[in-house]
Image (spheres, rainbow, N blue to C red):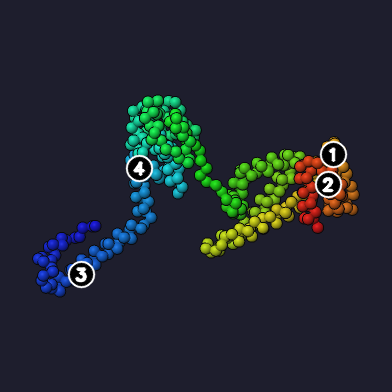
């Protein structure tokens, strides 16, 4: 509580309760009571401020991890700099034994390290703040392992060998994207850049190399999908960004998924129409004969026969009894989809 400008005992001499007060003394007493109430009210509001909680948390963390300087908490430029800081502190050589239940407290874990009793990958460790990598083995010497064997408890995220008193620091996945967030990323330029570098594109390229020569078909589909997402961006922000945040996002996400699937079907039909159907790996004995047969069906009378009629010829030539491998079944499904898409 902050100090007043003048001492309270000099403002009102004598016992206040047993004597009558003058008008000025009553005014002074009223001001003192109001000032005390305002101070208590401000203190109660100050306890609920985020900055105060953040500073208290920072101080508690620095004390917990051995009086670390607080400036290390603010080295990152982004707001997420607190998460790497905590993860770096959890990988210290004195914190890992506590998480492994080799020790109960941090000072108890630092004592054997300073006494050269802890081994990291079969080598002695004397630095308490040494960073441990994924897969490193933390163990004790033989004499200490016998005494600590009965105190070790098992945990769900740690692999412990009770007989040898050896612990291993395992990697863990901290963040996982949901499907809704991936489809939200499709509506932004940053999301398209992330999608180009993601594992999903590598799987698409691998499938394209398996089923199509040159991987032009699936790459064209992806380029069309990115073009559709860019047109959606040019049209304006979606409803889920401009609407009320308290509304249900599930229905909006379903509408977005339906819109993307329709655009993907249109791009598929356009890519097939422009490419005039790549040579398909049809069932038979010779792959060259299959390719020649399909080329003859596709290239025959291109001006007079519509594309959907040529697709029907290929579908008629593919009898169910002749299909004997999964690759041909894959192409039969593609042709069925083309029959539904083409007018």
| Residue at (78, 45) in percent of width and height | 329
Q: What distance separates the C-alpha of mark 1 from that of mark 2? A: 13 Å
Nearer the N terminus, badge 3 or badge 2?
A: 3
| Residue at (66, 42) in percent of width and height | 203
Q: For the residue labelled by badge 1, is the local secondary structure a helix, a strand or a loop?
A: loop
> Residue 219 versus residue 115: which sits nearer the camera?
115
Tag 4 residue = 64
Q: For the residue labelled by badge 4, is the local secondary structure a helix, a strand or a loop?
A: helix
- Give x and y (percent) for residue 63: 33, 43
Q: What distance separates the C-alpha of mark 4 from that of mark 2? A: 71 Å
Q: What distance separates the C-alpha of mark 4 from that of mark 3? A: 45 Å
Instruction: Give the class, few, some or many, for how many residues have Cα within 10 Å of label 2's Cα (few <14, many ≥20).
Output: few
Residue contact between numbered discs 4 and 3, judged by CB atoms under 8 Å:
no
Nearer the N terminus, badge 1 or badge 4?
A: 4
Which dot, 4 or 2, sits closer to the camera?
Answer: 2
| Residue at (49, 33) in percent of width and height | 135
Tag 1 residue = 284
| Residue at (61, 53) in percent of width and height | 183
Tag 3 residue = 30
Nearer the N terminus, badge 4 or badge 3?
A: 3
- Give x and y (percent) for residue 172: 51, 41
Tag 2 residue = 320
Q: Quadrant of the N terminus?
A: bottom left
Residue contact between numbered discs 1 and 3, judged by CB atoms under 8 Å:
no
């Amino acid at each position: 509580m902050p100090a007043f400008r003048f001492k309270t005992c000099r403002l009102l001499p004598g016992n206040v309760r047993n004597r009558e007060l003058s008008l000025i003394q009553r005014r002074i007493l009223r001001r003192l009571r109001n000032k005390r109430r305002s101070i208590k009210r401000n203190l109660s509001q100050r306890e609920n401020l985020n900055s105060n909680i953040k500073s208290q948390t920072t101080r508690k963390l620095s004390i917990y991890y051995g009086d670390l300087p607080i400036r290390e908490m603010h080295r990152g430029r982004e707001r997420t700099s607190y998460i790497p800081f905590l993860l770096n502190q959890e990988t210290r050589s004195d914190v890992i034994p506590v998480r492994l239940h080799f020790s109960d407290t941090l000072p108890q874990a630092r004592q054997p390290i300073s006494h050269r009793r802890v081994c990291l990958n079969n080598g002695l460790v004397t630095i308490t703040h040494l960073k441990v990598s994924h897969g490193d083995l933390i163990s004790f010497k033989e004499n200490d392992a016998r005494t600590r064997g009965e105190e070790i408890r098992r945990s769900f995220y740690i692999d412990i060998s009770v007989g040898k008193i050896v612990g291993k620091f395992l990697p863990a996945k901290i963040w996982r994207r949901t499907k809704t967030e991936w489809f939200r990323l499709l509506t932004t330029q940053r999301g398209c850049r992330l999608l180009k570098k993601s594992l999903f594109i590598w799987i698409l390229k691998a499938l394209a190399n398996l089923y199509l020569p040159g991987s032009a078909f699936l790459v064209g589909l992806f380029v069309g999908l990115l073009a559709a997402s860019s047109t959606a961006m040019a049209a304006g922000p979606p409803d889920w960004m401009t609407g009320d945040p308290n509304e249900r996002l599930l229905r909006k996400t379903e509408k977005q998924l339906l819109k993307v699937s329709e655009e993907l079907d249109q791009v598929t039909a356009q890519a097939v129409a422009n490419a005039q159907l790549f040579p398909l790996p049809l069932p038979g004995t010779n792959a060259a004969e299959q390719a020649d047969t399909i080329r003859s069906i596709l290239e025959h009378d291109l001006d007079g026969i519509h594309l959907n009629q040529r697709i029907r010829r290929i579908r008629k030539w593919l009898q169910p009894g002749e299909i004997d491998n999964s690759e041909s079944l894959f192409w039969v499904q593609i042709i069925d989809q083309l029959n539904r898409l083409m007018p």
